[in-house]
Image (cartoon, grey):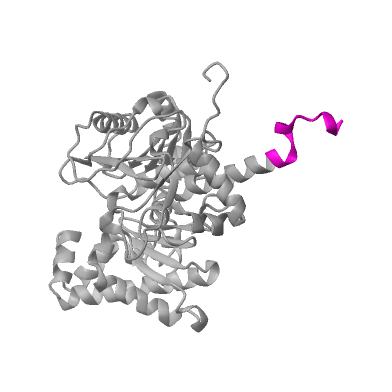
Amino acid sequence: MLSCMHEHDGPLTRLRRGHEQAVLELLRKHGPLSRAELGTRSGLSRTTLHDIVAEVVGNGSVVASTPHVEVRKRGRPVEKLSLNPAAGEAVGIDFARRAVHVAAVNFAHEVIGSASEAHAADLSWPERIDIAGRLLTSLATGSGSSVSSGAGSGSGPGSGAGAAGSGSGSADDGRRGRSGTVHLDALSAIGVGVVGPITDPGSENARAQGIDGLPDLLRKQFGVPVLLDNNTRLAALAEAVWGAAADASDVLYLRLSHGVGGGLVVGGALHRGRYGLSGEFGHITVDPVGRPCECGGTGCLETRASLDAVLCRYREAGGRADDLAGFLDKAATGEPSALDVLERVGNDVGGVLAAVCHAVGPGVIVVGGELAGAGPALLEPVERALRQQLMPLARHHVDVRRATLGEAGSALGGIALVLHESPLLSHYPQPVSEENA
């Protein structure tokens, strides 16, 4: 009978728990938010939100803080709410083409530290995983070289690790990092990113890439579950959480590197597509009678805007550069042939971005990868072509920005994958058992 139902099992109690979980999930996915931002995102009334915030702050799940003095604007500082930074940590690993990058973040989304180590392009997966283990150990002992640090590190039952794989870039000085202390015994999940479409770790495509056994190797090394995704998509998610598009919920990310790829963040969540094929912008046709692409197509954007393609176009125009750094130096000094190549590449890129914008309608476009190091010489032609080819109604609703996270982007994306999707974190804070109460 309803009259015999215990009060703690009643519908109002279940509704309140649901509201608490909604608030905690928003802070888990988006990091520090003001009360006003929480109200907008959650749809809760001011009175209900006030009660929920008082409860989660009171039990220690959430902490309130104000911005540091140096980042405050005029007027009264806006208090931000975040998950308790001492409650746990997440670690991300990016298995790049010629380097391994790791990063660590606490539950308040504060970056604790990062480290990198270069390696040969043909290094085996077990050896790459050993590097990741060494880098994480260096963060755990604080032995990495330091460039910056976060605050409030800690450990807890909900900590996790995320990893991204086979992107581009290298640590040219071998090993480097950001200071911080990571608690390896607190890891609870790893998100793994690999190059190319991601469907099933046991698929033929995975075997062809040599990554079919990667999740098992990581589980054996770290003893935690594994989440798998493409590292460029993870970089897109990281830019939406910590980077250039942290103020946007609908983001298109394009990486111009040894390959050309990207990712979509829609409504604050990573969009993969049914078969893991989302973000393959590099294989959109630019020139139907152009050069063959390794995907089997012809005249794809990758054949015109990847690093090798750009250097090839430059040399065909009479330019001389041994590598990308040399080409970027020429562009920085205003060499006409280098600037002309960037103008043409920017026009190709802008046209593809316009087509994608018409399909998905992002608010922010983030351009990353090594070629983005050209700065305005590339981004201005991209934006011009984009504006010219967008329908008039959309031209003033898309903001083009350069990526800000650099080589740490995909590792941070691995962390975001854990914070967004790990089932082990979906019910933070962990309930206290009777025997430990």
- Residue furthest to the top: 435
Q: Residue at x 44, y 72 (%)?
A: 398
Q: Residue at x 46, y 35 (%)?
A: 212
Figure check: 44 above or below 159 = below
Is residue 8 found inside the magenta-colored segment of the image?
Answer: yes
Q: Count up the numbered dots.
A: 0
Which is more toward the observer, 315 or 57? 57
Which is more toward the observer, 310 or 429? 429
Residue 381: give x, y in percent of width and height.
Answer: 31, 76
Residue 32 seen: no
- The magenta segment is 1-13
Q: Main secondary structure of the magenta part?
A: helix
Q: Is residue 361 left or right of residue 413?
A: right
Which is more toward the observer, 249 or 60? 60
Figure check: 120 above or below 404 = above
Q: Is residue 306 left or right of residue 386?
A: left
User: In which image quadrant can residue 15 be found?
Assistant: top right
The quarter of the image holding the N terminus is top right
Residue 383: give x, y in percent of width and height.
Answer: 36, 75
Is residue 107 found inside the magenta-colored segment of the image?
Answer: no
Q: Residue at x 46, y 37 (%)?
A: 207
Q: Is residue 76 left or right of residue 407?
A: right
Residue 225: give x, y in percent of width and height.
Answer: 48, 30
Residue 55 seen: yes
User: In which image quadrant can residue 152 be found?
Assistant: top left
Figure check: 274 above or below 59 = below
Figure check: 376 above or below 254 = below
Residue 63: give x, y in percent of width and height.
Answer: 43, 42
